Image (cartoon, rainbow, N blue to C red):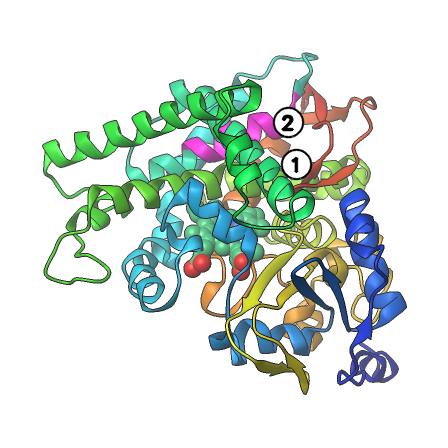
Amino acid sequence: MTEEALQKASVAHNQVKRLPVSIPFDMLQDPLQSILRIPRKYGDMAEFRFGRYTVRVISHPDLIQEVLVSNHNHFVKSRTMQLGRKLMGKGLPASEGSFHRNQRRVIQPSFTHERVANYMQNAFTYANEAIGGWREGAPFEFRGEMMRLTLSIAANALFGTDIRSKAEETRSALVQSMEHFTIQYYLRVFYFNQDRNPFADFWEALPVGENRRYRAARVSLDRTIDRLVAGRRNDGTDHGDLLSTLLRSSDYKDETAPLSDGQIHDELMTFLLAAHDTTATALTWAVYLLMNDRESWARVQREADEELHSGTNESEPRVRLEFAGRVIAESLRMYPPAWIIGRQAVDECEVGGTRIRRGTTILMSQYALHHDSRFYPDPWTFQPDRWTQEMRAALPRYAYFPFGGGIRACIGEGFAKSMSALILATVAQRWNLDLVPTPEVVPHARVTLRPRRGMVVIPRKRNR
Ligand code: HEM
């Protein structure tokens, strides 16, 4: 970054602008445009009130660092995640305090650098098998295909199970559950403006349409998970994976008791949810961007040819996919699957020298920061080569946070990045892809930032 850009980037934070009353409705109608417009028009700290809620939108890396890292004790996960407990109980993303700390200590060893490198061996086999089933000229929806693949890879790595034959059933039950969660969120927060609302509870209890589909999805997921846990308990051997770790672990609160089946169930549900959507969505955006930059696609192919040696040593892929890694970094910048994160203040505190009242919701948007021209020259163009060592070193830490940060940073970051680069290279090595122009690929901000109507591609065998 130039000296001038750095100066522009260090604006005075201690001003909080009041946002117009129309903002919540703008955000509902067009969340991405609204979240981009707020810092440009109102600065790095802006606030609005919506019924009982006070919401502060912060849009500067230093302020984000305060909330996620230096001042994190004053904040808990936002209301969205509190609703998320319906889905994942006290799974890792939804717990707080010492419970979360102990839980993270138990789970972390399953995501070390070494473990992730081991996971990549099966990931490579699974990816090759999945893409080997594609038929020349036969269109398919890419994100759904990537969901089945990443779900199968994660279930194998973390729970030592092969769910490939049930991947579609599991994927569709997870998608249905997320849909229900999103509807409930909008219903409670935006329409009824209360988290605990008897009308929303009544609505949710009705045995109709979407509610019925959600319940059926939950039954199917619960059954899959329960069978998995029971099977492993009966087998009794240590498989050295996350599921074995959990079965041997003591309770996060009472160290004299073993971890309950209920808690293990919540952890497994969490990892299925975390694995099925984010990484598949990241891969979809990466391929979309590459479809519009054929030169970079050819570079991914050349690198894959040199590094993957398909067919000769599939069991030991040398994963040194430098350019594919840059492509993933750049697509996570332009289309971050986690496009916004929130926190809620548990007591009165300060951010950027200004008072935050207890209960205030803080919103921090990756999508806004990642397109901020104070930090990225030409933020709307896809430039994988911008990710040099020098650029990374000069970039303020929280100008780029696709995986969040601080004590709640994504535990699967290394896994997601390695898996994405490996799958991308594996696809590129064997196929060329053509994008089907309709429906147009446009970002849609739901729980994750995804293409509104998916992305249909046509595979063409690569001639080498
Ligand atoms: C490109 C893919 C991914 C993206 C963009 C992503 C993004 C994120 C972000 C932004 C957070 C922090 C949320 C917050 O602070 O409120 C998070 C947390 C988390 N992620 Fe990921 N994630 C990805 C892949 C994965 C994978 C593959 C796994 C596991 C297999 C995973 C498991 C988790 C868990 C368990 C948490 C909660 C951590 C905690 O609260 O201690 N994620 N992720």
**Image coordinates for residue 56, horizontal then vertical, percent:** 70, 68
**Image coordinates for residue 151, horizontal then vertical, percent:** 45, 33
Q: Is residue 370 visible?
A: yes
SS at badge 1: helix
Location of mark 1 (residue): 284
- Which of the two discs, 1 and 2, labels the residue nearer the N terminus? 2
The amino acid type found where label 2 is placed reads Phe
Residue depicted at 69% across the width and 15% down the height: 139
Residue 262 lies in the magenta-colored region: no
**Image coordinates for residue 319, horizontal then vertical, percent:** 49, 48
Give the position of the C terminus as an image quadrant.
Answer: top right
Q: In the rendered view, does 456 fall on the left or right side of 439?
A: left
In this figure, what is the number of numbered marks? 2
Residue depicted at 66% across the width and 38% down the height: 301
Q: In the figure, 95 relative to 170: above or below? A: below
Q: Is residue 282 visible?
A: no
Residue in front for this viewpoint, 247 or 81: 81
Residue in front for this viewpoint, 289 or 82: 82
Magenta segment, which residues?
141-152
Pick out the residue farthest to the front: 198
Location of mark 2 (residue): 142
